[in-house]
Amino acid sequence: MAPDLFQAPDYYNLDELFTEEHLLIRDATREWVKRDVSPIIEEACQKAEFPKSIISGLAEIGAFGSYIPEKYGAAGLDQISYGLIMQELERGDSGVRSTASVQSSLVMYPIYKYGNEEQRNKYLPKLASGAFIGCFGLTEPDHGSNPGGMVTNIKDMGDHYLLNGAKMWISNAPFADVAVVWAKNEVGRIKGVLVDRGMEGFSTPTTHNKWSLRASTTGELIFDNVKIPKENMLPNKDGLGAPLGCLDSARYGIAWGAIGAAMDCYDTALRYAKERIQFGKPIASFQLQQKKLAEMITEITKAQLLTWRLGVLKNEEKATSAQISMAKRNNVDMALKITREARQILGAMGITGEYSIMRHMMNLESVITYEGTHDIHLLITGMDITGISAFK
């Protein structure tokens, strides 16, 4: 793969909107990606392996639970800092961002928000340090966009719970130390439980033959009469709103992350267009290539402004689920379109591993679907503005 020469576009001088701390955190993450991710990510993708060697580095830069309080071993940063970290990680690879996003928003967040102090002290410091890796079990083989239809269930056996069912498309599952799992109790109420690696009847088979997110490990969660201690139940929130609250945090991070992938493809295409000579001059001099590049930077800039404002609202605890859905849908769609245009600028070179574009394109085909599909997020906005649900 070519050397990482990435230069981030900032057409509207957005850096002036960030604090000095924000910029330090972003730049530190950017340098870490250049040093520790870029040199190895292409090989990891080709081999379909998650590079576990980067886990300690992710912890060191505060990528695990960055907004969780310092008393639990995390960085205690604000929501814009979290977003900027996700942006820089996805600039490297969506799979790397997915690992950090799941750890932060889908594992550490529910333990912090919905767990008790004993659970927080037991799990959060280990998750923040990377000593533990977690995963999140909501999606099932027959229930993706309709998670409320889940069939995974827990039964109260007196001194413990009995968990049965299966989850699918679970990032980090094959090597996770703990899983935050959502299941229905006897009366159909959704509850969250913590399932530890090694519990009898709990298995995590790997999902193979993926063309997307190849540098991220995906698997299933299988529960066959798994005995769950009573103290492993998350006590502070239940119902479908509990896992959806986690997804709000993760979707917010994705909205930032997608910008990173788009910026990387734009930067690659711009540099290539200036250097590639055809008909005696750089292809950047031709109108159609300038059209592509101009539209790319326009869409990136719009997404940056959208996401910055969302970050301000998140910090003020004013961001709504519908606003987060809009940003996730818009930014991932934007990034995917930019990968396709950037690939065309590079011609045949765009499909090779010498450049990151095709890898980003394949990854974003997953990102546009997971944690709420492109169409579902559109309907969430539709429901918000009309007051009428299209889901029922």
Image (cartoon, rainbow, N blue to C red):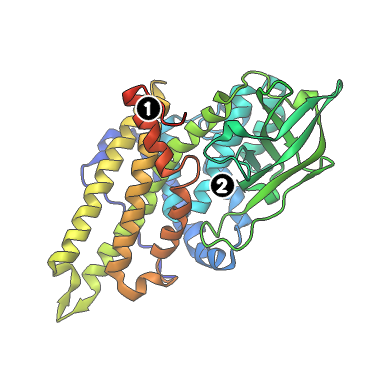
* Residue 328: % across, % down: 39, 39
Name the one closer to the observer, 129 or 305.
305
Q: Is residue 35 left or right of residue 276?
A: right
- Identified by mark 2, the residue type is Thr
- Identified by mark 1, the residue type is Met
Q: Which mark is residue 383?
A: 1
* Residue 381: % across, % down: 35, 31
In the rendered view, tell whether residue 233 sits above or below residue 247: above
Q: Nearer the viewer, mark 2 or mark 1?
A: 1
**At x 19% / y 65%, what residue is drawn?**
289
Q: Is residue 364 left or right of residue 141?
A: left
Residue 39 seen = yes
Element type at mark 2? helix
Q: Within 10 angstroms of label 2, few (less than 14), some, or many (20 or more) residues?
A: many
**At x 57% / y 28%, what residue is drawn?**
70
Point out the residue furthest to the bottom here: 280
